[in-house]
Amino acid sequence: MRFASYNIQYGKGKDGKFDLARICAALEGADVIALQEVERFWPRSGDADQPAEIAALLGGAYHWVYGPGFDMDANGGKPGGRRRQFGNMVLSKTPILSSRHYPLPKMGLARQYSLQRSMIEAVIETPKAGALRVNSLHLSHVGDGDRAPQVEKLLEIHRTAPLEGGAWCGTHKEEAWTLGFGPPPMPAAAVYMGDYNIPPDSPLYTRLTGPYSADYGRMSHAGGLIDAFVAAGGAENDPKDWTCDSCEPPRTLRRLDYCFVSTELAPRVRKAWIDQKAQGSDHQPIWTEMDL
């Protein structure tokens, strides 16, 4: 299966033009897609319902869920349900069995602009490996001080999700609650894709992937996470492996977008690459191919 992750900068490309069709063309061939910076009803992007437009542009071939971290009134104070939203999306060619949406910790900053970040989870069925948790997330752009508790929340979710069970669990005597089906799965196996806003030399990268051993590489443990790009043979911090070209200050090329997988999935990683030719955003799509 091919997994793609793309911070689409609400459709605004390197040329300053908004073009969701260009975004979707860059994702052709993906079985599972994680998107960040997807918005609804913002004047800057034409008051578009971007999740619905993206799903339509992809031919209606994907099941999808959307989770806004930022959510405010978009009706000018008038009654109605229209909301100005900004968040993450997961699309899957196989059914999404259940979904959960997590707000991530946020500091109430006084001087820097900040906004609520979140992670959207989709439990999907894979052809070979059973159920899998797929997550699309976006960490704070402000600094590691803001991101550190978000990383801890991610690790807590990774650790506790299987213990919490599926969207519902147990039994119920009334079929109206179960519709005749058993509890949905909540597997330990998980993929976390998104814009982490951390370079590989950040202490938070080490927090996610384990301490580094000069003799053996990352000291990963059974409940930890693996950088799929490295599992496929890539380097942690090679300047040519950049995913973002508008990080200021200073304006440099850095790898900030990742696909982390739970340790049991690492042997299934076959290939990983960065599409550095895509022009639809200030970030680049990242791809991971796994035997699932």
Image: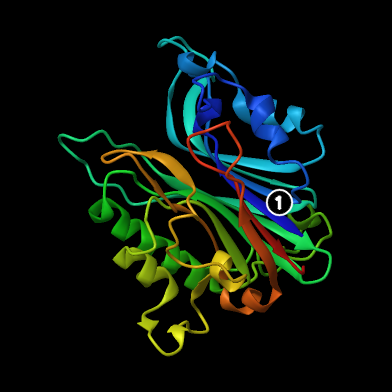
Identify the image quadrant of residue 152. Answer: bottom left
- Residue 86 in the image: x percent, y percent? 47, 32
Give the side of residue 87 with respect to residue 271, left or right.
Answer: left
Up the image or down, 91 lies above or below 45; here it is below
- Residue 182 in the image: x percent, y percent? 78, 65
Mark 1 secondary-structure assignment: strand
Please tell me which residue is depicted at 71% across the width and 62% down the height of the picture: 289
Residue 219 makes an appearance in the image: no
Please tell me which residue is depicted at 38% across the width and 86% down the height of the picture: 214
Give the side of residue 214 with respect to residue 68, left or right.
Answer: left
Locate the N terminus by quadrant. Answer: bottom right
Q: Mark 1 — residue?
A: 32
Q: Residue furthest front?
A: 240
Please tell me which residue is depicted at 42% across the width and 63% down the height of the picture: 237
Residue 77 makes an appearance in the image: yes
Identify the image quadrant of residue 154. Answer: bottom left
Up the image or down, 43 lies above or below 195; here it is above
Please tell me which residue is depicted at 49% across the width and 50% down the height of the picture: 137
- Residue 246 in the image: x percent, y percent? 39, 37
- Residue 203 in the image: x percent, y percent? 30, 67
Q: Residue furthest left?
A: 110
